[in-house]
Image (cartoon, helix red, strand yellow):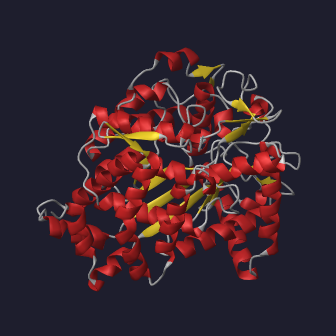
Amino acid sequence: MATEYQDLLELFQPRANHSVLHGICHGIERESLRVTSDARLSQKRHPEKLGRALTHPYITTDYSEALLEFITPVHCRIDDTLSFLEQLHQYANQHIDGELLWSGSMPPLLEGDDSIPIAHYGSSNIGVMKSIYREGLWHRYGKPMQTIAGIHYNFSLPEAFWALLRQYSGQEEINVQDFRSAGYFSLIRNFLRYSWLLMYLFGASPAVSRSFFADGGAQSGLQSLDKDSLYLPYATSLRMSDMGYSNHAQSSLNICYNTLEDYVDSLSSAIRTPYPPYEAIGLKKNGQYLQLNTNLLQIENEYYSTIRPKRIARSGEKPVTALRNEGVEYVEVRCLDINPFEPLGLNELDAHFLDIFLVYCSLQGSDPIDADECAEASNNFKTVVMEGRRPGVALKQKGQSVVLQDRGLQLLDDMSPIAEMLDQANESSTFVKSLHAQREKLNDASLTPSAQLLNTLETEGFSYIELMMSLSEKHAKSFSGHGLSDERLAYFEQVAQRSIADQLARENNDRTDFDAFLQAYMAAE
């Protein structure tokens, strides 16, 4: 008996519908710490040649002043996205005054909170708000978490894709915006079901320096690899474990992905819900803000999800307001580690597989997720993060035990027709090639980035810090060896100068004091 998935595959088989799959768009956000030649976090301000982090469209900072974030424009060709990302790295590499772009997700040597500078965004109200938000993150979760870096993969399906599905499903009475949003939430639910596979395939942070922990890692539950490095033998991503992007306060949140309305309501509620431990921190001290509010979430971005429904908001508009009013525009995949062996943190095969995976999630049936399935998906993800390469490690599928490798290979088999269609639509062979590369990792765990990293540490006698420094230096030489054209160099210099002027204009145009600005922002629906 044909399944709904098989029927949808047939829908996209005709050559006339290939253009729909050709219109998939991508953007990549790659974080990277600036570090000194002795593997310490940079204490310098954001480099002047990189413009202003508040207003630069492509080069900004994340939680720490030292944590650069490179943001590509949206492209329909993955190669174009990666090419622009490489140019950003080349430009930044020339203008960070002898510092290096750290190659790993977990940070370099940390020397206490005072050595981790919080990002600054100038004196405009929105700039001050961004800095206070990061102050709040420090008081809530500690500063070391602000030094963890990752990759965000932004993915959108073209309007023609949703129009074809809407027509096929016979739901043309539903308006296009609502149908598209429901489709993206269906994708997200399937992503939550299967994202453990991404952690096995792309997790690249099984080790960390002891300096990440205030107690040197004594209570971390990790094993010693050498005098400085801690690890877990079968871990794939310490970054996505409880010691990374996870916290106990948010475990009480019941963020629902079954409908857009439920999602927006649950996030909005968390921003309004008081939380006693954060109330104990206080809102201000000596007249200075310690956090934006004392509720479960300061703003929506504080919710550390592995994937987010997104829409570009207007200036001053809350993200949840933009979603509520205009629906989902794209999804942001947030669970990807930086592959330290890759100069850009990922390669073209990785990116092509992400497209296959996300199209698969969009075409698979996706019933609402109840509490039991939500717990099962969460436990599968945690299992792979902590011991995904352990031989015979088992996951749960609808309550039944399944071997990770067997389930992973089954999923790749199901994705094979999508890889073939994407190759046909894009006149390439890279999608099928990327699927083959992932199949090899499932058949041989030693080919995964996490295993390769541990193997290099053990066989070459590096500590985690030494290996990341070696790779950082190697990538810096690679960026220096492929210089930008004079035209591109001039373009990036113009963008940097424009960002300086734009920030100054914002600061000069503010007419409201910050207290009133923040109150109005928080009260807005």
Above-or-below relation of 362 to 80:
above
Q: Residue at x 85, y 57 (%)?
A: 97
Front position in the image: 486 or 11: 11
The residue at 87%/57% (across/down) is: 98
Q: Which of 288 and 78 lies nearest the eye of the viewer? A: 78
Q: Return the residue found at the far front.
A: 392
| Most foreground residue, 287 or 426 | 426
- Left or right: residue 94 versus residue 274 is right
Task: Residue 15: give x, y in percent of width and height.
Answer: 30, 85
Reply above or below: 370 against 216: below
Tell me where residue 126 sits by quadrant. top right
Q: Is residue 456 left or right of residue 56?
A: right
**Location of residue 424 by image quarter:** bottom left
Asked if residue 356 shows in the view, the reply is yes
In this rendering, the count of numbered labels is 0
39 to 413, vertically: above or below: above
Instruction: Write the residue at 63% across / 47% down.
Output: 62
In the rendered view, tell whether residue 44 sits above or below residue 4.
Answer: above
Tell me residue 374's x, y (percent): 34, 36
Q: Where residue 295 sits: x, y (%)? A: 45, 25
Which corner quadrant of the image does residue 283 belong to? top right
Q: Residue 230: x percent and y percent?
A: 73, 34
Any part of residue 513 in sight:
no
Q: Which residue corresponds to the image point at 56% horizontal and 75% vertical from the top-left? A: 80
